[in-house]
Image: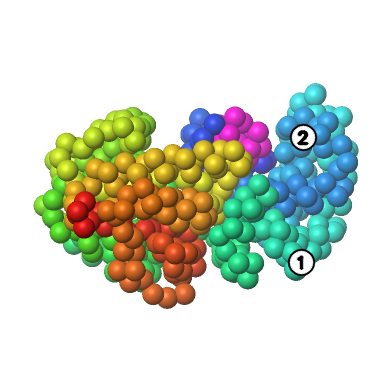
Amino acid sequence: MRGIEAALKILTSSDLSSGAFASESLRKLADRENMKTPDISLASSLVYIVMRRKELWENIAAKFLRAQEDLPPEVYMSVIMGAGGILELRRFSEGVLINGILEYLKRDNAFIKYVSLVNAVLRKINESGIELAESYKKSAAIEDKAVYSGIPVWSMPAWLKTWSRPELAQIFEMMLKPSFAALRVTPGKLGELSQLLDAKEIHYTQSDISSALRLSGSILPAKVPGFSEGLCTVQSESSILAASLVRKFYEGGHIVDMCSGRGVKASQILQECEGTKIECWDIAEARLKSAEREFARLGLSERVRVRVGDGVILEPEESPSFVVLDAPCSCSGTWTRKPESKWRLDWQKFDGLAGVQGKLLDHAVSICSEGGYVLYITCSLLKQENESIVAQVLTNHPECADVSGLIGWKGSMYRRGKPYGTYILPYNSWLDGFYCALILRRSDNA
């Protein structure tokens, strides 16, 4: 019961719409109310079931619910959460879930009059909801496949401008896979970390990336043995691959990380490029405070200069030979891992992101020294945020050239951009969708 109540509190709170991650909201609620592990697990499952495929559950519920616009948010979300839980939870009794939702509604006098309606709707969904969900899965229409996979309707024009319909069918199928955690191992610490994981009976396997391990589920960083001691960092394999390009092409000199965020990629670059220093920018002071804690945890603080400010305006302390720009984006490649982000966006906000990306990349190539590189990264799979941005900047800067062909990634999890950059597809549970473009700043006289 407490797990059901907690899930509904999170799903109807203003935290998610204001930018909070569901995992963080759940952690705070669990600490405040001293929730037990089974309740936390149930609440987490229900929240993410709703967030990943909210429009699918809404469409199914709409078949049996004609007056949804008149329902209080708590009642409407009870129906949506119930629909998702009934159709997706395999280890939890439908009857227990339905009864738990009804008991929650009965506790508030404002909701009692809706109990019989919610009960009737959820019973009908339990009877025929699976067939309705399967109809979306089996449909030949790519729009139905998108709904089944949790792709928001608003974003479909952008997907169709980027990929062919057969490609989209494959990508949407990939995005149905669960997201698992990967650990980037601090150099020289694999043996020590393995011993700690074994002692805690945490199952792991070696990643295809030599510096990473794969876990068989998700985990909070603070719960990873050896994390506080700096033995590892929780990081998706796509993020590790993207940041590793710096080591591949870096030839010395100053590095600027323009949108450093919490410093995960910057710390990897420092660990892989011994002796180098890096200048980290971000517009949000809170994110850079987190980055400073990350650098301290890994013993890298002395090699970092942190600066709060707008990446479009800031000027580097010295001309960088390498600029990393992990631009703010729709996060469409990480919608499986962080599903909250897709419901905060609409077409207008998406267009606004593209404008910011263009300004940031224009500034990045402007501050880069001759002969240096700019690595443009997004966790998006949409052309408007990727190839279109690169094309715009290359047109404005004839002294620059896309040299992404040098990256050399090969295999079914990669796709060349059209025509710039390279995509990493969410091919397995440890990969997110990413885009990387490597730009060379040639001599102005070249």
In percent of the image, x 61 and y 31: which residue is there? 13
Farthest bottom residue in view:
411
* Region in magenta: 6-17
Q: For residue 150, which numbered disc appears in the image? A: none
In percent of the image, x 31 and y 64: which residue is there? 403
Label 1 crowd bin: few (<14), some (14–19), many (20+), radius 10 Å: few
SS for callout 2? helix
Amino acid type at mark 1? Ser
- In this rendering, which labeled residue sits more in front, label 2 or label 1? 1
Q: How is the structure coloured here?
A: rainbow
In percent of the image, x 77 and y 42: which residue is there? 79
Q: Is residue 82 left or right of residue 309?
A: right
SS for callout 1? loop
Along the viewing direction, whichever of 103 and 219 lies nearer the viewer: 219
Q: Quadrant of the N terminus?
A: top right
Q: Quadrant of residue 443?
A: bottom left
In percent of the image, x 47 and y 53: which residue is there? 388
Farthest left residue in view:
275
Along the viewing direction, whichever of 402 and 431 lies nearer the viewer: 402
Q: In this rendering, does residue 384 appear at all? A: yes
Amino acid type at mark 2? Val
The percent coordinates of residue 40 (x first, y second) are: 55, 44
Along the viewing direction, whichever of 204 and 175 lies nearer the viewer: 175
The percent coordinates of residue 99 (x first, y second) are: 78, 44
